[in-house]
Amino acid sequence: MYRKILLVIVLSGLSSGSNSGQSKSSSASIDSYIEPYVRTGNFSGVVLVEKNGKTVFHRAYGFADREKGIRNNDKTQFHIASISMQFTAAAVLRLVDQGVLRLDEYVGEYCPGISSADKITIRDLLLERSGLPDINALPDYDEVLQHHQTAASLVAKIQGKPLQFEPGTKFVHEEHSAYNLLALIVEKKTGMPFAKAIERLVFEPFGLTHSGMDDDSAELLQMAKGYAPEGTYDVKPAKAIHWSGKTGNASAFTTASDAALWVGELFRGETLKANSREAVLDTSTRVGYGWMRGKNERFGATAYSMNGRAPGFASFVLYLPGSETTVVVLSNIYSSATTVVGYDMAAIALGLSYEPLPLPMHAPRAEELTNVTGGFQFGADFYQPNAKVIVKREGEELFLYWPSGDRSALIPLERDHFVDRSYWERVSIERDETGRAAVLVYGQFQGRASPPAQD
């Protein structure tokens, strides 16, 4: 089965888009770097790199629609998930520039049903420090995505629920509900549906002609079809959702060219007034206005980045103002590999070190998977606190089973070394003196065998 899957992936391989202005050496390096991700079904999309305002790499890979044989190209549109927050934030800042809104006004005027609405400011929402309960964590959130929604219907889902912490005091996690509420405020201030308001406030003045907000109302002819990982190397069509269920926080779509234009205009243009642009650039808080902001140790410089994942899609954008380097990675496969790819492409473009993905060309032998399975107990600081993660072998494949019910395939790199395909995290096994798996290392965390690992 492995060889059949691998053959299909190799044959569906690469498709090239525009490539003007690329240096042959960096182009070849980036192409060679990305090829294993495409070959193994972990990337299909468009990548773009700019330096000093000039495109140095722009290429499409894989299929926009595998079933119809339609390849991705430089006009293909992709859902960009959480990167959508940048457009919502920009719309709010445009209203601030026009004197229609103030960052320090409270949200009670717009949604009095929200708990402690008289304590939460618009700035708190933009900085994701509101303390609002998160709609994505509600038990019926999957059902929410199966029906058409509006900003008002999404905000109504959290009305009356208690805050998680005092507004303005800290950032805990991505606040999807905060951006649902910002979308509702934009609608109330403009008198327009959110998608139309963003078009008028952001897409038109910033010159983004191939971008929009998906409110379920239009047929998107250039939109890539989304896919989800299936097992270790295969993919399958992603479960369909109503993108209106992500209004304000993850409903945008764009092309790589538009995304790069957006970065350039946002950071170096004049569409936003100086005070609003400075708010986006401010690194005194790590998260804000749809960006992660601050010193990046790898590049030794200030960096602005954001990634996104939503059913069938993954995305990443990076801007390094010191070297005026922009990286855009848009994929129609639900895999967090886009973030690793984006950072490494920046490193290639800047002549820095990077680590190619050492994917094997052969199926793992049975003995390589022996004594790996079992339960591993992690601590309170793990992604899922105090989680017991189960490693199971299914035929020639290994999977991680999470307490949440999610399952992640483990891509073998070499004996006892893997990549979690869903979250693109390095995973390794440490064995005891008998050769049994004693510790599961997941990124920077360690889970100990409990009970002793069994085949």
Image (cartoon, rainbow, N blue to C red):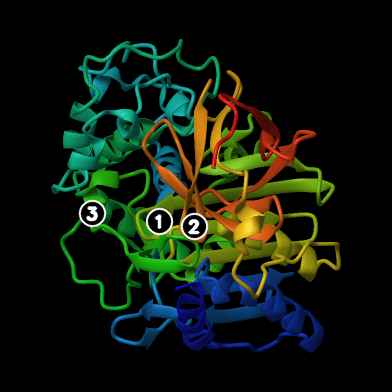
Q: Earlier in the sequence, mark 1 or mark 3?
A: 1
Which dot marks residue 241? 3
**Amino acid on which the number 3 mark rests in the picture:** Ile
- Relative to 449, is 203 on the left or the right? left
Looking at the rendered image, the disc whose residue lies closer to the viewer, 2 or 3, is 2
- Circle number at residue 202: 1
In percent of width and height, residue 41 lies at 50, 70
The answer for how far apart the CA atoms under marks 1 and 3 are is: 25 Å
Is residue 396 toward the left or the right of residue 312 in the image?
A: right
340 to the left or right of 223: right
User: Whole-Å distance between the Cαs marked 2 and 1?
Assistant: 28 Å
Q: Amino acid at mark 2?
A: Ser
Q: Nearer the viewer, residue 223 or 87?
A: 223
Residue 133 position (above or below residue 163): below
**Residue 168 location (% of width, % of height):** 50, 17
Q: Residue furthest front?
A: 434
SS type, badge 2: loop
Q: Which residue is mark 2?
A: 335
Residue at the spot x=28%, y=28% of the render?
Answer: 138
Quadrant holding the C terminus: top right
Q: Secondary structure at mark 3?
A: loop
